[in-house]
Structures are given as C-alpha cells and as structure tokens.
Image (cartoon, rainbow, N blue to C red):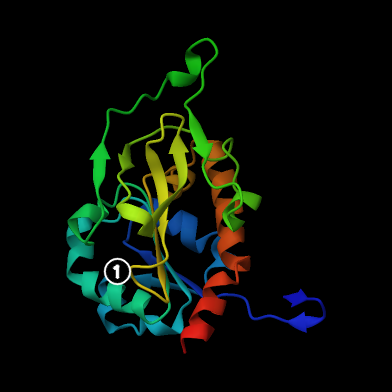
Amino acid sequence: MNIGNKLVRKPVIAAIDAGFYYHHQSLLEEPFAHFFDQVIYIRDVPLTDLKQFDTLIIPCRTNAYQLAPLSEQFQDFMKTGGRLVVMGETFPDRWLPNVNFTGMETNFWWWLEEGADLGVRIVDKEHSMAVHVSKEVATWHLHGTLDPLGDNQKSLIATKEGECLMFEDIDSYAPGRLIVTTLDPFFHHGSHFMPTTTLFLERFLTWLSEDQTLKARKSRAA
C-alpha cells in the first residue's frame, strides 16, 4: 500500500476456523479469502503465536465453550498490541471479562412491514470504519445487544433507541483493542443467504485491512 509515495505495511489479519461449513466458505473461499494472511483451526490456537498478527477475527457462531479456555491467550494478544474482533453469536460475555450481552427474540420478517426500518445506525460517523460501513450494509436482523461499560467501550453501531450492536474498547487492553459485535455476517454469507451480509463483510474487512491506527498506537507504546 502506498500513501504519499511511502510504502505502508498492510495489517496482518488472521481468523479462527471452528470447522463449520460457513467458516470454510467465508474464510477459505473468495471473495474474502485474500483478506486473511492465516486461517487457524481452533484446536491449533493454543499452539500459535498470536503476536505475529495485527488483527485476529473470531467469526460468527464459534462455540463459546471452545473459546473460554483461550481467553487469557486472547487478552495477552491484545495487551501486546493486537486487535481482537469478536463477531455475533459467540457469547463473549461467557469468556471475556467486562462484556455484557442481552439476547433478544429475532424478527426475521421486519422488512415486510410498511415503512419498515430495523433501526440500525452508525453511531460514530467520524470513526474510520464509518467511511466503509453504512447503516444499509449493517442491516439484516438482530440477535441481541451489548451494554458498553463506561468510557472505555465506545458504541460504533447501535439501534435508533441507542442499544449497542458493536463497540470498540481501545483502553482496557492498550496498546491493543477489542471490537465486539452482535452482528453475524460470516454465518449468513457462508450459508449463502442474506446478500447484505456479503456487502457488510466486503466493507468491514476492507476497513480492517487498510486501518493503520492500531499500528500507530502499537509503535508509540513500544
């Protein structure tokens, strides 16, 4: 990547494969396979040096009971400068500290109502993610909400009522950071339905692959 004739290293991105068909489709097949420098089978995570990666993604519906024994490894990864991205239906409240999740009954047919609006909103329009991710591509359905704790956890995507659907924590694990969302795009893209989720992943992964803010924070902390 060239910025002002200066060669800038792209972030190194890894993702965990828990063995589900939708993980295989999303992580190992195009149009998204090229975003991942390494895909790690979940049983191999304890044997992997995560510090070689800038960003580690835990895709949708990875089993929380498999993730729980890896919690300290994930926290150490962030504390040494990594960004952990936790996707929907992984129940991070069961395996990460200071994450509050509230499930909800999912309305799969909201779009049939007259004047339908699921109410998804981009909260921080000045955030670098907002250049890529719009409310339209973040709208399909909801499985639950998060309750950000204090000023450390800043809401990035929310409902129109202010219920958090994605937050970023840039302080608790500094110089690394934590992103948690209840959205589940890897599942839907890998299951070949809900086309909006494919657009979301294209925009979201593009942002992660281009974002240099984490590298700058890590360099200052070194």
Residue at horizontal 51 percent and vertical 77 percent from the top: 217
As drawn, the residue found furthest toward the top would be 114
Task: Give whichever of 101, 9 is nearer the camera.
Answer: 101
Q: Which residue is mark 1?
A: 42
Q: Is 92 situated above or below 120?
A: below
As drawn, the residue found furthest toward the bottom would be 222
Residue 12 image offset from top left, x and y in percent: 53, 76
Specify whether residue 98 is in view: yes
- Classify mark 1: residues with Cα within 10 Å, few (<14), some (14-19) or many (20+): some
Q: Where is the N terminus found, in terms of image quarters?
A: bottom right
Q: Amino acid at mark 1?
A: Ile
Task: Please state if 129 lies on the left or on the right of 95 as rendered.
Answer: right
Task: Give whichever of 186, 174 is nearer the camera.
Answer: 174
Q: Is 83 situated above or below 194?
A: below
Mark 1 lies on a secondary structure that is helix
Residue 109 image offset from top left, x and y in percent: 42, 20
Number of numbered discs overlaid on the protein picture: 1
Query: In the rendered image, which quarter is residue 85 located in?
Result: bottom left
As drawn, the residue found furthest toward the right would be 5
Residue at horizontal 38 percent and vertical 72 percent from the top: 40
Residue at horizontal 20 percent and vertical 61 percent from the top: 95
Specify whether residue 30 is in view: no
As drawn, the residue found furthest toward the front would be 151
Residue 94 image offset from top left, x and y in percent: 18, 55
Task: Please state if 86 lies on the left or on the right of 194 as rendered.
Answer: left
Residue 138 image offset from top left, x and y in percent: 52, 40
Residue at horizontal 35 percent and vertical 78 percent from the top: 79
Q: Is 7 situated above or below 113?
A: below
